[in-house]
Image (spheres, helix red, strand yellow):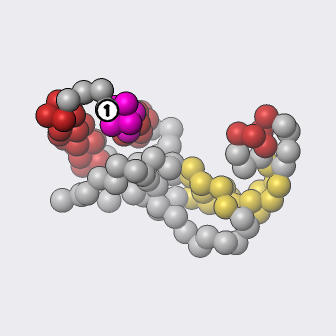
Amino acid sequence: MVKIDWGGTFERRFTDPGKVKFAHCGICGSKMKVDRNVLGSSDVAMLLYGRKRRHDYFYCPNILEKWHKRIYALKVAVYYQELAGRPSRSDMKKFKEEVTKEILKLLKKHAVK
Ligand SMILES: [Zn+2]
């Protein structure tokens, strides 16, 4: 059975050129594609200030798929619910079980390993 990495929400990664050989998507586990030695902004702050640097850009090949976005949203929802500590423990457990079922169904349907 696939185990869900609840902390893994990275579907893009920016690393120093050549530093990372390969990476796997935190959403679906697929091996990420990579554009090496790209010149551009590698985080939001750099983007805002128009700064650029050389970096490797890793991204999931499924990033634009609807089901991929759904899993991302579900994981983020679980993260914020837990952070807020709002629902009771048993409600949270139930919520997480429902989310787990949906995520596993989506991963199975799209044959992602
Ligand atoms: Zn992915």
| 82 and 41: which is toward the camera | 82
**95 to the left or right of 73:** left
Q: Is residue 67 visible?
A: no
Estimate the x, y position of residue 83 in percent, counting from the top left. 38, 36
Q: Is residue 39 visible?
A: yes
Task: Find residue 13 and report its image quarter.
Answer: bottom right
Image point (34%, 54%), residue name: 5
Up/down of 31 relative to 77, above or below: below
The magenta stretch is 78-84
Residue at numbered disc 1 = 85
User: Helix, strand, or loop for circle 1?
Assistant: loop
- For the C terminus, the quadrant is bottom left
Up/down of 82 relative to 112, above or below: above
Image point (29%, 47%), residue name: 107
Is 85 contained in the magenta span?
no
Q: Amino acid at mark 1?
A: Gly
